[in-house]
Amino acid sequence: MTAKTFQKLLSEEVQSYKSLLETGDGDWIVKGFIDVKKNIYTITNDTKVISKLIELLLIPRLAEFARQNGLVLELPSAQNFYPDLTFRDAKGNLFAVDFKSSYYGSDGKVNALSLGSYWGYFRNRDVVKNTDHPYGAYRSHLVLGILYRQKTVDSREKNVYPIRELQAIRSVIGQFLFFLQPKWKIASDRPGSGNTRNIGGVLEIDRLVQGTGPFADLGEEVFDDYWMNFFNSADARNAGIGKPRYQSLETYRNYLARQQALRKKLEK
């Protein structure tokens, strides 16, 4: 199976996920956690909790998608391994799919979106490091994005509800949007939030859905070269190169121009 065929099949599958996670009123189907005594404990809109619950809801559906298309779904063998999902076809071709979720506002932008490390396995693509397969063994690296609106958290969130009062519990999120795009098409030229070595994603919903980040017209080869050679200030000092070679696509172009000028001098 080609990378293009796999993406097309999974894109069609993802279109049905809105109805899977949402009620007819646009609310999330999850209301809380239930114990063996049928007591329901409500949840907050904590992004880490929400993202994990969404994954748990989608994985069985994705496993069925794999079965119907002659694929094998592999889950990572350890926590924080890349990617979240590995699909293997009958010929042994591997396809990486990473879940990425974030909430969005009325301005048409998501709060934040990081697309994984630009260090470690991303640079050392022929070795197994925090992965079950080398990064370079995958035919494609896709992002399954789940975007949602946050809702006002119920002031009674500390209450415990009997199951007969399920309908009285308010959903903390809703109005889901989904997208599936190759990582390089939605990547920004800036790192993700904080001091982590993560690739930042574009924040505009339209660009995420359509796959029109700054590398989309430049190609995956440029994306790979840019992020495989990217250094933040601390790493640049530790590597002995002083300051980062570049910090944006504009300064990356200037860096390449200088390198080309030096090569021309050597060729004389």
Image (cartoon, rainbow, N blue to C red):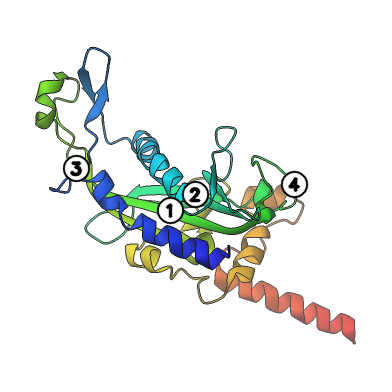
Label 2, label 3: how far apart the Cα atoms are:
25 Å
Mark 4: amino acid: Val
Where is mark 3, residue-wise? 151
Classify 162 as above or below 96.
above
Kind of residue sitting beneath label 1: Leu
Which residue is found at the position 72% from the left and 76% from the top? Answer: 258
What numbered label is drawn on residue 127?
4
* 15 on left or right of 86: left
Observer-side mark, 1 or 3, equals 1
What separation in Å lies between label 4 and label 1 (alpha carbons)?
25 Å
Give the mark nearest the N terminus, 1 or 3: 1
Q: Secondary structure at mark 3?
A: loop
- Crowd tier of the residue under label 2, counting other residues whose Cα lies within 10 Å: few below 14, some 14–19, many 20 or above: some
- Judged from the image, the secondary structure of the residue bearing numbered disc 1 is strand
Q: Which residue is mark 2?
A: 98
Disc 4 or 2, which lies upstream in sequence?
2
* Mark 2 residue element: strand
The reply to whether residue 240 is visible in this rendering is yes
Mark 4 is surrounded, within 10 Å at the Cα level, by few (under 14), some (14 to 19) or many (20 or more) other residues, namely: some
Identify which residue, 8 or 227, lies in the foreground: 8
* Label 4 with label 2: CB-CB less than 8 Å: no
Q: Disc 4, disc 1: CB below 8 Å?
A: no
Q: Quadrant of residue 205?
A: bottom left
Which of the two discs, 3 and 4, labels the residue nearer the N terminus? 4
Q: Residue at x 67, y 48 (%)?
A: 121
Dot placed on the residue nearer the N-terminal end, 2 or 3: 2
